[in-house]
Amino acid sequence: MYYEGPIYRPPSEAGSLLIQATVGCPHNRCTFCMVYKDGVRFKVRPAGDVKADLQEARRVYGEGIETLFLPAGNTIAMPTDALCEICRYAQEVFPALRRITVYGSSQYIHKKGPAGMEKLAAAGLSRIHVGLETGDDVILERIRKGTRSAEQMTAGRWVMEAGIELSVYVILGIGGKERTVSHAAQTARVLNAIDPDFIRLRTFVPKVNTPMLEDVQTGTFTMLGPHEVLRETEALIKPLTITSQLTSDHYTNYINLFGKLPDDKQILLQEVKLALRRDEDCFRPFFIGDQ
Ligand code: SF4
């Protein structure tokens, strides 16, 4: 099996077969992200090569594979027909396959339109992980996410309407002290409009070789402390009126939250409240990320 560039996958894909259909990220401009900044250029692998990898995986692991993740920054950006062909072939090779997942940013989902999402769903694509990061258009512009909240809402709804599971990532603290109120309120607004299957919280950690680390070091960007991140979390959860599973399954977070909205909303808020009673020294220290 062929692997090129950094291979990232969500924690929820820890047990999945990883087969690369694309390399790198076609956007590669987000100011907080270091993943593909070392020069690896975006490319789509020929479908024949991906199919050969799927065959090899079957020889190595047998035909019992149940979940497949196609890693790299924005595999959703590859041509729809080629991605459909790979999804269909994967199901032939692995008859027990019940989930095929990719990463995808809203702008690339938006380019495909609702018809593209329906086509992919029919071919067997079953889950997309989208880096929403924030619903605040000022922050989206600053972090050069390449999309706006209106586009994120439309794209998210198209994914849900096509019957593809949607998992969205929110970065707590990504607006710094200056935008924390707006970040929480605007992100809740966008999440309420989409009602994704999963909301996954991450906490902003400046990464090596990124413009945001420079901003932190020069004082242009003021990071939130643990209590401020927790208060932002509270402000984000309170206005949610949706049915998503909310989880903070990541090493960057100050506390672990896990609950199904709306039933667990008060429990989640209570956990945040309890955490706010702890001294700030009890939480993980500041660090600069290198992965
Ligand atoms: S965060 Fe995602 S879309 Fe942005 S540069 Fe990194 S891989 Fe690409």
Image (spheres, helix red, strand yellow):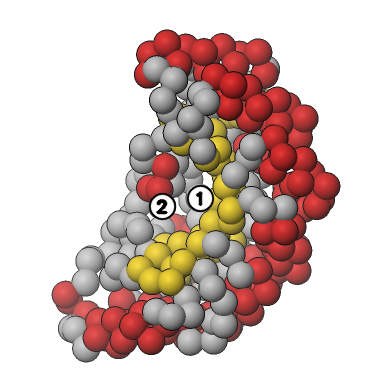
Label 2 neighbourhood size at 10 Å, few (<14), some (14-19), many (20+)? many
Give, as a three-letter code, the residue at label 1: Cys
Q: State which quadrant residue 102 falls in.
A: top right
Give, as a three-letter code, the residue at label 2: Lys
Residue 221 seen in the figure: no
Q: Which residue is under mark 2?
A: 207
Give whichever of 218, 101 is nearer the camera: 101
Q: Position of residue 71 (x, y in %)?
A: 52, 35
Which element is circle 1 on? loop
The mark nearer the N terminus, 2 or 1, is: 1
246 up-or-down from 55: above or below: below
Residue at 48 percent of width and 42 percent of height:
35
Question: Quadrant location of the C terminus?
Answer: top left
Q: Is mark 1 within 8 Å of ligand 1?
A: yes
Residue at 50 percent of width and 56 percent of height:
32
Give the alpha-carbon distance from disc 2 to disc 1, as whole Å. 7 Å
Mark 2 and mark 1 residues within 8 Å of each other at the beta carbon? yes
Q: Which residue is under mark 1?
A: 33
